[in-house]
Amino acid sequence: MPDIPDYELQTPEPPRPPLPQRPRYAPWIAAAIVAAIAGAAVWFYLRAPEADPIASEPVAEVLPAAPQPPAAAPRSLCAPTGAAAAPPVDGSDKALAPFVRALSSHPRVTAWAATGGLVRSFTVAVENIAGGRVPVQPLRALAPSGPFRVIDTDKALLVDPRSYARYTPIAAAVASVDAQGAARLCAALRPRLEEAYRELGRVEPFDQTLERAITSLLSTPVPAGDVRLVPAGAVYEYEDEALQRLTPAQRQLLRMGPRNMQIVQDKLRQVALAIGIPSERLPQ
């Protein structure tokens, strides 16, 4: 957990008459972003420094350390290509940065490539999302900006579409990634991904965790029409119970808005197929 929990942050609304009995606290905002870049270059997950006022469970950087038993028949994703051995986890950032930049020239991708601990950051993010949680530290540098907004009508509280526009540059960054190049980089890094995963105390093959993370985000429903909110103390919840029951990681993706979600999910599907997940195992 961060020193100042995101859920306690306050993001003021643009000037408007206050609603009686309706708090305007914004406990968090995070953007679920998936792409095949950097360290494992398969997808990435973004978090904003400000907070969207939609209630959710606390985030975590590393899941509880209870190990899971290995599957009887491990899957093989990011199959080795026979390329030169990947650099060690420690000190790998300098060697990896040029390959990440080759996958995309988008400024938000190159910004992440300039941060440290790429392999470990990716591994932690995958572990969190596979468990339905939101990673805090990985890709902090790529956060969207701008306030969360709602539309207050006489009949309902709605997510203002302008809130989704904050994520358009992030969706563009995801769309810019070369899926096949990401799969090749993932294959080259596979031994280091397994190594970083073992550092978390896990015994399950990383392949399975990676596939679980990808399929959970692909199964997030893209809403049609207005998204309604209801006040819940100092936060908002989704009026649609099916949306509110989604995992925190899925709800973060939901907050990007329908168009941006579709862009991210389309790219994620391309990457999933490129790294070796059969189409029949992917949500349709």
Image (cartoon, rainbow, N blue to C red):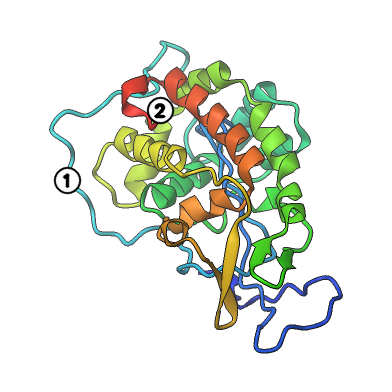
Up/down of 99 relative to 136, above or below? above
Going from N to C along the chain, the mark reached first, 2 or 1, is 1
**Few, some or many C-alpha atoms within 10 Å of disc 1 (few <14, some 14-19, many ≥20)?**
few
Find residue 61 and report its horizontal and vertical position in percent: 47, 59
Q: Name the residue under label 2.
A: 190
User: At 84% from the left edge and 76% from the top edge, which residue is drawn?
Assistant: 16
Q: Answer left or right for 1 relative to 149.
A: left
Residue 3 seen in the current view: no
Per the image, label 1 sits on a secondary structure element best described as loop
- Residue at point 39% right, 48% down? 127
Of 115 and 161, which appears nearest the observer? 161
Alpha carbon of mark 2 to alpha carbon of mark 1: how far? Answer: 20 Å
Work out whether residue 122 or residue 217 is closer to the camera in this orientation and state it.
Answer: 217
Where 184 sits versus 146, above or below? above
Q: What residue type is labelled 1?
A: Pro
Q: Quadrant of the C terminus?
A: top left
Q: Which mark is residue 189?
A: none
**Point 73% across, 52% down: residue:** 161
- Residue, far bottom: 21
| Marks 2, 1: nearer the viewer | 1
Vertical arrangement, residue 258 with respect to residue 10, above or below = above
Residue 200, image x, y percentages: 35, 51
The image position of residue 66, as x and y in percent, is: 24, 59
Tell me, yes or no, whether the two marked residues, 2 and 1, touch with CB atoms within 8 Å. Answer: no
> Badge 1 is on which residue?
69
